[in-house]
Image (spheres, rainbow, N blue to C red):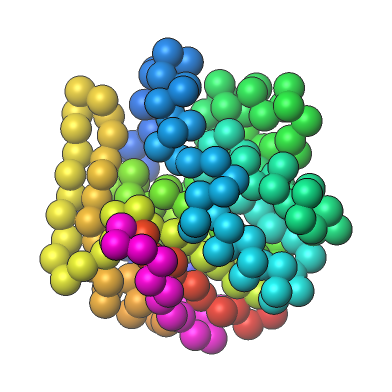
Amino acid sequence: MSYGIYKTEKLYLMKKFKQTWWDDNIKSQFEDFKSWVGTKDAYSKKWARRHVISSGFKSIVDVGCGNATEYFAYKEEAPEIEYLGVDGSEYLYEYNLKAGVPIRCAQADDTRLPVSSYDIAFSRHVLEHQPDFKPVLDELIRIGRKEAMHIFFIRPKDKEIINYDPKQNLYHNTYIKQEIEQYGNSIPKVSNCYWVELSKTEEAFICELNE
């Protein structure tokens, strides 16, 4: 089930698009990848954990979890919180399985998880790599019970820039901030949306949800 209505062209792109950069490149660039996403001590990760813990949430699904640093951080800081990682990369899925991470191999816009199955549905640095932000945001809202959160590493602005590299099959998009907020607030399950500026490059978008 999807809550959103997309423009025909963007829906076509989303259906056609399959993220392949990670499985094509991550084995040879894994150390680079880890430096890009940061350790568990990256500021935006620490901020998000404080938010989750202080909100009293009991479960989190980490969509596009990468190497799942957050699983180990929650084990240290709040082991009572149930964690599930989701990633579409088979390499990362196998890597996390071997490390003992609860993990599901699925695309970010189609996790195949039940509606409202985790207190917070969380993603970080994921929407910018998609043809359109709406399908993944829809999925976060669908599977979240109390909140859906995304942390942007390319902060949304007042102009959309769809930056696609066909050789790498990789997007680095800048979205329109007002459009994201309006879209979130248009979804019946959402009671309120707001932004938190984290740094010059990172910003959190949070949707509070009706249970």
Counting from the top left corner in percent of width and height, residue 187 is at 46, 77
Residue sitting at the far right: 80
* Residue 190 relative to residue 20: left or right: right
Q: Which picture quadrant has residue 115?
A: bottom right
Residue 107 percent location from the top left of the image: 51, 40
Q: Which residues are magenta?
A: 187-201
Residue 156: quarter of image:
bottom left
Q: Looking at this rendering, what residue extends furthest in the bottom direction?
A: 191
Left or right of 194, for residue 56: right
In magenta stretch: residue 195: yes
Q: Nearer the viewer, residue 36 or 128?
A: 36
At x 26%, y 25%, the residue is 168
Residue drawn at (49%, 72%) of the image: 206
Rendered residue at 38%/71% (across/down) = 197
The quadrant the N terminus occupies is bottom right
Image location (x, y in percent) of residue 143: 63, 61
Residue 75: x and y in percent read 79, 48
Reply above or below: 5 against 44. Answer: below
Q: Nearer the viewer, residue 99 or 15?
A: 99
Task: Verify whether residue 83 appears in magenta.
Answer: no
Q: Residue furthest top?
A: 28
Q: Which residue lies at the image location 76% right of the left edge and 74% below the top edge? A: 56
